[in-house]
């Protein structure tokens, strides 16, 4: 082997080594560039993901709160309806019971109704302070025949206000109705008071429901 051949072989090895180093250098640069790009994309993806997750979380929270609010309002409405129904039923039952007791009481003159009727008549006549015509149901006529301020006793079978007793006072001259002192009319005036008392009793229940 000649000297020239050795120099040529060494030059080729150096060239190949230089190519290998350049290749590795470019490969490393490409790897770094790729890693940096990958990290950048990962960061962007993570950011977008966090934003999307946050958006979804907020949407779900809003939907949950709306569902909860709607459900609460629905439950509250149902409870209030139930309470109103119970109050209405109790009011109706109370009126029915009182009315039944009143009819029972006024059907027995000896049980105290005679004195009550006398008091109702005198209260009505006090408005006129003069003799007047007193209208009563047929079964009450004999209870008033001897009253000094009763100029005349008339009976009325068709007036529903007299069904439960009491009296209606007419002006003796004009026959105009002056005073309605029937038991049912007096009872009618009490209905508002009964409703008010029941409402007061149930106020605390309504207050609790309103705080739900």
Image: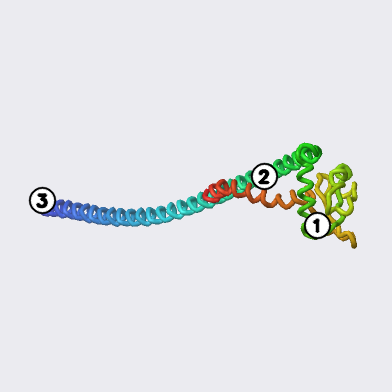
Q: Which numbered disc, 1 or 2, marks the residue that appears first in the sequence?
A: 2
Disc 3 target residue: 2
Mark 1 against mark 2, which lies toward the viewer? 1
Disc 1 target residue: 179
Q: Residue at x 35, y 55 (%)?
A: 43
Q: Residues within 10 Å of mark 3 (few under 14, many from 20)?
A: few
Q: Give x and y (percent) for residue 127.
A: 77, 59
- Calculate the distance from the C-alpha at mark 1 to the C-alpha at mark 2: 36 Å
Nearest the viewer among 70 and 146 is 146
Q: Which numbered disc, 1 or 3, marks the residue that appears first in the sequence?
A: 3
Nearest the viewer among 45 and 176 is 176
Q: Give x and y (percent) for residue 132.
A: 85, 57
Mark 1 against mark 3, which lies toward the viewer? 1
Marks 1/3 in contact by CB < 8 Å: the verdict is no
Q: Secondary structure at mark 3?
A: loop
Q: Residue at x 89, y 44 (%)?
A: 138
Q: Is residue 191 left or right of residue 71?
A: right
Disc 2 target residue: 85
Marks 1/2 in contact by CB < 8 Å: the verdict is no
Q: Which numbered disc, 2 or 3, marks the residue that appears first in the sequence?
A: 3
- Calculate the distance from the C-alpha at mark 2 to the C-alpha at mark 3: 121 Å
Relative to 205, is 45 above or below? below
């Amino acid at each position: 082997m000649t000297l020239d051949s050795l120099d040529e072989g060494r030059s080729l090895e150096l060239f190949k080594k230089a190519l290998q180093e350049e290749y590795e250098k470019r490969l490393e640069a490409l790897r770094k560039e790729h890693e940096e790009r990958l990290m950048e994309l990962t960061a962007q993806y993570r950011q977008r993901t966090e934003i999307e997750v946050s958006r979804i979380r907020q949407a779900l929270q809003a939907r949950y709160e709306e569902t909860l609010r709607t459900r609460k309002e629905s439950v509250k409405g149902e409870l209030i309806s139930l309470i109103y129904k119970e109050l209405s039923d109790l009011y109706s039952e109370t009126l029915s019971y009182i009315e039944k007791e009143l009819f029972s009481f006024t059907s027995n003159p000896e049980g105290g109704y005679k004195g009550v009727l006398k008091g109702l008549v005198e209260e009505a006549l006090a408005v006129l302070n003069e003799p007047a015509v007193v209208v009563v149901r047929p079964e009450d006529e004999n209870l008033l025949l001897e009253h000094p301020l009763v100029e005349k006793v008339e009976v009325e079978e068709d007036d529903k206000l007299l069904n439960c007793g009491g009296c209606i006072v007419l002006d003796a001259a004009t026959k105009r109705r002056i005073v309605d002192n029937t038991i049912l009319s007096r009872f009618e005036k009490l209905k508002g008071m009964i409703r008010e008392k029941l409402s007061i009793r149930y106020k605390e229940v309504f207050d609790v429901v309103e705080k739900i």
